[in-house]
Image (tube, helix red, strand yellow):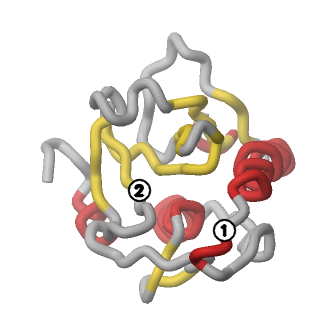
Amino acid sequence: MPDPLPPWVADYVGLPWTVLGRSRDGLDCYGLVRLVLAEQFSIALPALDGGWTSERRVLDLDRLAAFIGGAVAECCAHHRWHAVDSADAPRAADVAKFLLHGRPIHVGLVVGQNWFLHVREGSDSAIERLDSRMWRTRLVCLYRHGTLA
């Protein structure tokens, strides 16, 4: 694990991906962000587990993009979240929204300077760099909770 990251981060690496997962038994990207924010920062987010088809092979990417790209923005506004100015450095507990398949359908949680935690289909949860070749051009926005501003 890269240094220096908070020691609690290790507890969230290696968790399995599951569509609509909301527990340590299996998580989707939003479920992982939701779990960590609740356990480490006492920030409760709604489950948001009814926004798309739950069968893996039938995922509707347009609905999923609307769910994460639109509904999460509404959720953020409702729960005192705001978009982080691009001049601000990412901070632990910022939520990063990414493009996948050309749509804003992936989220991760910043855990240290330029490091984020996430999980995606086919992989267990892992830490990667925000500025890596894979993610730097896919990062759409960072959101920060008002209590952490």
- Give the CA distance from mark 1 to mark 2: 19 Å
Amino acid type of the residue that numbered disc 1 sits on in the rendered structure: Leu
Q: Residue furthest top?
A: 87
**Residue 79 image position (x, y, % from top left):** 79, 51
Q: Residue furthest bottom?
A: 25
**Residue 148 image position (x, y, % from top left):** 58, 41
In the image, what residue occupies the spot 31% across and 40% down? 115
Q: Is residue 149 above or below residue 5?
A: above
Classify mark 2: helix, strand or loop: strand
Where is the C terminus found, in terms of image quarters? top right
Q: Nearer the viewer, mark 1 or mark 2?
A: 1
Q: Where is residue 24, by image quadrant?
A: bottom left
**Residue 21 image position (x, y, % from top left):** 56, 79
Amino acid type of the residue that numbered disc 2 sits on in the rendered structure: His
**Residue 113 image position (x, y, % from top left):** 31, 32
What residue would you read off at disc 1? Answer: 59
Q: Which mark is residue 118?
A: 2
Q: Residue furthest front?
A: 57
In the image, what residue occupies the spot 72% across and 57% down? 64
